[in-house]
C-alpha cells in the first residue's frame, strides 16, 4: 500500500478519529467556501465577480434542468391519479396474500392527530384484514402513551386485521431519543407478531408513516401492484410523493412555500433514480428490513439512513422506486407566528442533518469492496453536492452579488466586467424567475379543495407567496443547513426534534 493510499484511507488514525474526519468534512467545505468568498470579494474582487457571473449562469441552467424534471414528474403524478389501482391490482395473481405492515411512531402528538391518520387508513380501498397496524409510542411520555394506546384499542380494535400498540422504553443505552429508536423497537415487536401469524416475510410490505400521514385511498393498492410486478421487489424501497396539504390553506405563506418546495424537490428527483433516497413516509420490503436488522437507533435521519443500510448490505444492489401517489402531512403550524417560525426552522435543520449520511456512506464504502467504484463515486458525489449546495448556493448568490462591489467601489470603476456585471446578474436572475412562475402554477394545480372558511382571493396569495422563495431559501434553507453541518463538524450532535402538530 502506497503512502498516499494509506493517507487517503485514513489508516493512520483510530477508527473513531477517522470517522470524525469524515464528519468534519461537510461543514469544513461549507465554511471554507463562505470564508473564501468573503476574502476574495475584498482582495480579488474581479475574480469574485467573474465567479458569480459564471455561477449564476450555472444556476439558471440548473433551474431549467430541474424544472424540466419537475414538469415530467408532475405529468406522471397526474397520470397515476387517473388509474383505477384496485382494478389493476386484481389482475395480479394471488395479490390477496400481500400484507401491509404500517408503522406509526408517535411521541407527544395529540390523540386527534393519530385518530385522523387511523381513520384515513380505515377508508383505504384495500382489504383491511390484510393490515397490521403498529402504533409505536414513547415511554418518555408514559402517561400520554398509555392514553393513546387505550384510545387506539377502544376506537380501532377490530377495524384492521391486527393492531399492535407498543411503548418504547425511555433512556435505553446507545440510543438517540427519536423516531429511529422508536420504530426500531416497535419493528422487532412486529416481527414477533408476523412470526406468530406465520406470514412469509416476502408477503409483507412495511410502510413507515408519520403520526400525521394521510394516505391516498389508492395508496396501498398502488403499492401492492408495484411490489407484485416489480422485477426485483425485495431490493427496492417505494417512495410516494409527500404533500403537506392537511392544513395548507390555514398555514402561513412562508410555511407553505417551504412545504411545497420540499414536495417539488422530491417530485423532480423521481425522474433521477440515482439521486432518490427514501424520505419521511415511505414503504419497503419487510424482508429487507429484517436483513439489515431494522432501523438504526442512534441517528436522526432514519428515513434516508434505512435506504443506505439496505444499499450497503446488498452491495449496491438496492434502489428506490418512485410512486406517483401522495401521502399528505401537515404544513408547520403553531398557535403563534413565532412558534411556527421556530418549529419550521428546527424541522428543516433536522432534515438538513441528513448530512450525517455522508460520513456513514464514505465509511462503509471504504470497507465494502463489492460495490463498484463508479457507483460509490456517483452516490458520494450526489450526497455531498446536495448537502453542500443546500447550505451554500443561496448565500453565495447573495454575498457575491453585492459584496465585491460594496467593498471595492472606487477600484472597480474602470473595470468593464464590474460595470456590466450588475446588469448581467439582474438579467440572469430574471431568467431564474421562470422557475418561480412554474412553481406557482404547479403548486396551485396540486392544491386540495378550498375549505369554505377560506375566501376565494386566497388563490391570489397562493400564487404571490412564491415571491418569498428567495427569503425561504436562506432563512429556511442555507442557515439551518449550515447549523446542522456545523454541529456535525464540531461533534455537537443534534437530537430528534418532533415538529408540533395540532387539530382544531
Image: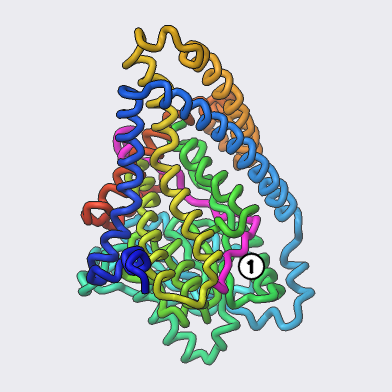
Rendering coords of residue 149 (x, y %)? 35, 70
Q: How is the image coloured?
A: rainbow
Density class for disc 1 (Cα within 10 Å; few <14, some 14-19, many ≥20) is many
- Camera-side residue of 169 and 491: 491
Percent position of residue 166, x then y = 35, 75
Going by the picture, which residue comes out furthest to the right? 91
The correct choice, above or below, for 346 with respect to 172 in the image is: above
Q: Quadrant of residue 216?
A: bottom right
Above or below, 142 against 452 in this view is below
Left or right, 110 with respect to 72, comes to left
In depth, the one of 104 and 335 nearer the eye is: 104
Residue 136 visible, this angle = no
Question: Which range of residues does the magenta coloring cover?
Answer: 316-342
Is 334 inside the magenta-drawn segment?
A: yes
Quarter holding the N terminus is bottom left
Please name whichever residue, 17 or 130, is drawn nearer the observer in this view of the structure.
17
The magenta stretch spans residue 443: no
Residue occupying image coordinates x 45% and y 44%: 331
Residue 220 vs residue 334: left or right?
A: right
Residue 282 shows in this picture: yes
For this view, does 224 lie left or right of residue 164? right
Query: Quick check: 174 above or below 179?
Result: below
* Foreground pick, 179 / 320: 320
Quarter containing the C terminus: top left
The answer to whether residue 291 is above or below residue 38 is below
x 71%, y 51%: residue: 76
| Residue drawn at point x = 34 percent, y = 38 percent | 479
Q: Which residue is mark 1?
A: 223
- Could you tell me residue 143's position as x and y percent? 24, 65
Disc 1 element = helix
Amino acid at each position: 500500500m502506497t503512502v498516499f493510499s494509506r493517507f487517503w484511507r485514513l489508516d493512520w488514525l483510530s477508527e473513531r478519529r477517522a470517522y470524525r474526519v469524515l464528519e468534519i468534512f461537510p461543514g469544513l467545505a461549507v465554511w471554507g467556501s463562505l470564508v473564501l468568498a468573503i476574502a476574495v470579494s475584498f482582495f480579488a474582487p474581479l475574480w469574485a465577480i467573474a465567479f458569480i457571473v459564471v455561477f449564476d449562469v450555472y444556476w439558471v441552467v440548473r433551474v431549467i434542468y430541474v424544472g424540466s424534471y419537475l414538469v415530467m414528474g408532475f405529468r406522471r403524478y397526474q397520470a397515476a391519479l387517473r388509474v383505477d389501482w384496485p382494478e389493476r391490482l386484481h389482475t395480479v395473481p394471488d395479490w390477496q396474500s400481500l400484507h401491509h405492515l404500517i408503522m406509526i411512531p408517535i411521541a407527544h402528538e395529540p390523540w386527534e392527530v393519530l385518530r385522523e391518520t387511523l381513520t384515513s387508513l380505515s377508508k383505504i380501498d384495500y382489504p383491511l384484514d390484510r393490515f397490521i397496524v403498529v402504533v409505536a409510542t414513547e415511554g418518555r411520555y408514559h402517561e400520554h402513551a398509555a392514553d393513546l394506546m387505550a384510545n387506539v384499542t377502544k376506537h380501532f380494535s377490530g377495524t384492521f386485521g391486527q393492531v399492535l400498540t407498543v411503548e418504547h422504553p425511555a433512556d435505553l443505552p446507545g440510543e438517540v431519543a427519536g423516531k429511529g429508536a422508536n420504530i426500531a423497537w416497535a419493528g422487532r415487536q412486529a416481527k414477533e407478531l408476523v412470526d406468530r401469524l406465520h406470514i412469509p416475510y416476502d408477503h409483507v410490505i412495511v410502510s413507515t408513516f408519520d403520526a400525521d400521514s394521510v394516505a391516498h385511498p389508492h395508496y396501498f393498492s398502488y403499492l401492492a401492484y408495484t411490489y407484485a410486478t416489480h422485477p426485483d421487489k425485495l431490493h427496492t424501497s417505494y417512495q410516494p410523493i409527500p404533500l403537506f396539504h392537511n392544513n395548507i390553506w390555514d398555514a402561513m405563506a412562508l410555511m407553505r412555500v417551504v412545504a411545497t418546495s420540499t414536495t417539488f424537490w422530491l417530485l423532480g428527483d423521481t425522474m433521477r433514480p440515482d439521486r432518490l433516497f427514501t424520505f419521511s413516509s415511505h414503504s419497503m420490503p419487510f424482508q429487507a428490513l429484517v436483513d439489515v436488522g431494522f432501523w438504526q437507533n442512534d441517528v436522526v435521519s432514519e428515513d434516508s439512513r434505512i435506504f443506505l443500510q439496505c444499499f450497503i448490505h446488498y452491495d449496491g444492489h438496492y434502489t428506490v422506486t418512485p410512486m406517483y401517489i401522495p401521502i399528505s402531512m401537515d404544513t408547520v403550524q403553531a398557535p403563534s407566528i413565532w412558534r411556527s417560525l421556530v418549529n419550521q426552522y428546527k424541522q428543516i435543520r433536522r432534515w438538513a442533518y441528513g448530512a450525517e449520511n455522508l460520513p456513514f456512506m464514505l465509511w462503509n464504502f471504504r470497507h465494502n469492496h463489492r460495490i463498484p467504484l463508479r457507483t460509490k463515486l456517483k452516490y458520494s458525489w450526489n450526497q455531498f453536492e446536495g448537502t453542500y449546495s443546500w447550505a451554500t448556493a443561496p448565500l453565495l448568490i447573495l454575498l457575491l452579488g453585492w459584496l465585491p462591489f460594496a467593498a471595492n467601489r472606487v477600484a472597480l470603476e474602470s473595470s468593464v466586467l464590474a460595470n456590466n456585471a450588475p446588469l448581467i446578474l439582474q438579467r440572469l436572475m430574471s431568467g431564474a424567475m421562470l422557475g418561480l412562475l412554474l412553481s406557482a402554477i404547479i403548486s396551485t394545480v396540486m392544491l386540495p379543495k378550498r375549505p369554505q372558511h377560506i375566501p376565494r382571493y386566497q388563490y391570489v396569495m397562493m400564487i404571490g407567496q412564491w415571491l418569498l422563495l428567495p427569503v425561504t431559501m436562506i432563512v429556511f434553507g442555507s442557515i439551518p443547513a449550515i447549523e446542522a453541518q456545523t454541529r456535525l463538524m464540531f461533534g455537537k450532535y443534534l437530537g430528534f426534534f418532533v415538529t408540533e402538530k395540532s387539530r382544531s
